[in-house]
Amino acid sequence: MNIYFFYLIISILAISIALGLYRLVKGPSVSDRAVALDALTNVTTALLVLIAVLSARFIYLDVALVYAILAFIGVVAIARYLEGGL
């Protein structure tokens, strides 16, 4: 693939991370911060997959999968805590 395509994707992911961090810090409510944290974990997972493709080291795909599962469990725990279930 064209390397400029990967540079474009990395740029978009970097902008997404910056916007997510802004919402995480300046979120008006705790639930907004939880959604921003979930978005950041998704972008980080996409970044790990991109690193796996670029470096041709597919161990990063396993790391991305484990990271996504742990992030999902964390977001569910945060949502239950905010709902009052924990």
Image (tube, rainbow, N blue to C red):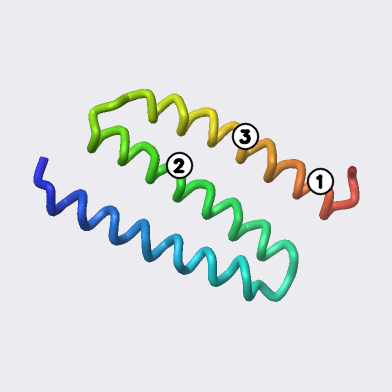
Lower sequence index among marks 2 and 1? 2
Q: CA distance from mark 3 to mark 1?
A: 15 Å
Residue type pointed to by label 1: Arg
24 to 13, vertically: above or below = below
Residue 10 picture location, percent across and down? 29, 54
| Relative to 54, 42 lies left or right | right
Residue ID at (39%, 39%): 48
| Relative to 50, 5 lies left or right | left
Q: Which residue is mark 2?
A: 45
Residue ID at (42%, 62%): 16
Residue type pointed to by label 3: Leu
Residue 12 picture location, percent across and down? 32, 60
Query: Which image quarter: residue 13?
Result: bottom left
Residue ID at (53%, 54%): 39
Query: Which image quarter: residue 15?
Result: bottom left
Lower sequence index among marks 3 and 1? 3
| Relative to 56, 71 lies left or right | right
Which numbered marker is on residue 27? none
Quadrant for the C terminus, please: top right
CB contact under 8 Å: marks 2 and 1? no
Q: Residues within 10 Å of mark 1 (few under 14, many from 20)?
A: few
Q: CA distance from mark 3 to mark 2?
A: 11 Å
SS category of the residue bearing label 1: helix
CB contact under 8 Å: marks 3 and 1? no
* Mark 3 or 1: the one toward you: 3
Q: Residues within 10 Å of mark 2 (few under 14, many from 20)?
A: many
Which numbered marker is on residue 70? 3
Q: Which residue is mark 1?
A: 80
Q: CA distance from mark 2 to mark 1?
A: 23 Å
